[in-house]
Amino acid sequence: MNIILLGPPGAGKGTQAQRLVVQRAMVQLSTGDMLRAAVKAGTPVGLKAKAVMDAGELVSDEIVSGIIGEALDQLPPETGVIFDGYPRTAAQAESLDALLAARGRHLDHVVELEVDEDALVDRITGRFTCASCGEGYHDRYKRPSVEGVCDRCGGTEFKRRPDDNEETVRTRMAEYRAKTAPILPIYEARGIVSRVDGMADIDGVSEAIESVLEHQV
Ligand code: AP5
Ligand code: MG
């Protein structure tokens, strides 16, 4: 099964994708995570992307569709994929169809996480992740069970994203409204969109997504 998790910054795409990876043995392809890795490694893509990401704007369609194509090529054909943060523009939605078709795959479902924008700044400014394994946390909504120790890998170093400040979040939200939300009708016309209440607690959102996906098979 190949699915898209769609929603604005802080909607919970990464949090829920990580759970699907564990529960359904799917692979998460997060363009944001892949771009941050490229920035960290100082690759040509990373050098181009850094300033754009720090400003909260969108990296070019060619770059992100290129990295998605390369990532798909690394996967065995039967592996289910969760697209997290991709596609984000009409051109990317078109590229995704072509990338999937060229690999004998197709898109099964789009899960839209519906959230109240006011909550997003709070979610994003409270977010941190394990520096070793990338597990996501939040200052109030999801603290490690043992303070300062990652639940998943036992790591003791955590980090915050440079674009997780209020000003950049506002730009990211504006980009979402202007360029990403308008792609939903493409998928609605295919009858493959389900809406999930992203304001429920993390377990509640997971249960709602699971119930949507159960009805897909
Ligand atoms: P990206 O990394 O995709 O960022 P984003 O879309 O802004 O989304 P976030 O990762 O901020 O939010 P999320 O929905 O994953 O939330 P999370 O689960 O972490 O993109 C970053 C940048 O890269 C872009 O701005 C752009 O420059 C570039 N880029 C990436 N993809 C691109 C593309 N396709 N095209 C062009 N440019 C691209 O949750 C947030 C916090 O809330 C966490 O702390 C979590 O613990 C907490 N939380 C989650 N769910 C809940 C809940 N239900 N209740 C309470 N707290 C919760
Ligand atoms: Mg994310």
Image (tube, rainbow, N blue to C red):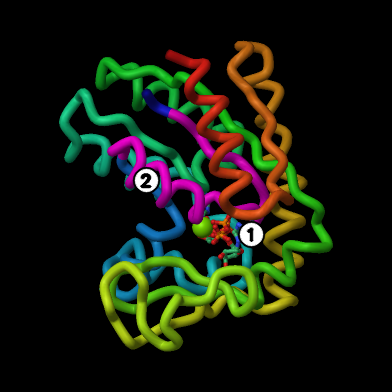
Res 28 quadrant in image: top left
Res 111 quadrant in image: top right
Residue drawn at x 35%, y 23% is 100
123 lies left or right of 99 = right
Residue that mark 2 sits on: 29
In depth, the one of 49 and 79 nearer the eye is 79
Which stretch is magenta?
Answer: 3-26
Q: Amino acid at mark 2?
A: Leu
Could you tell me residue 88's position as x and y percent? 58, 42
Other-residue count near label 1 (Cα within 10 Å), few / some / many at <14 / 14–19 / ≥20: many
Could you tell me residue 143's position as x and y percent? 52, 76
In depth, the one of 55 and 216 nearer the eye is 216
Relative to 60, say whether 148 is above or below. Answer: below
Instruction: Say the numbered circle drawn on residue 156.
Output: none
Quadrant location of ligand 1?
Answer: bottom right
Instruction: Say the numbered circle drawn on residue 10.
Output: 1
Q: Reply yes or no: does residue 44 show up in magenta.
A: no
Q: Amino acid at mark 1?
A: Gly
Other-residue count near label 2 (Cα within 10 Å), few / some / many at <14 / 14–19 / ≥20: many
Mark 1, ligand 1, within 8 Å: the answer is yes
Which quarter of the figure is the C terminus placed in? top left
- What kind of element bears circle 1? loop
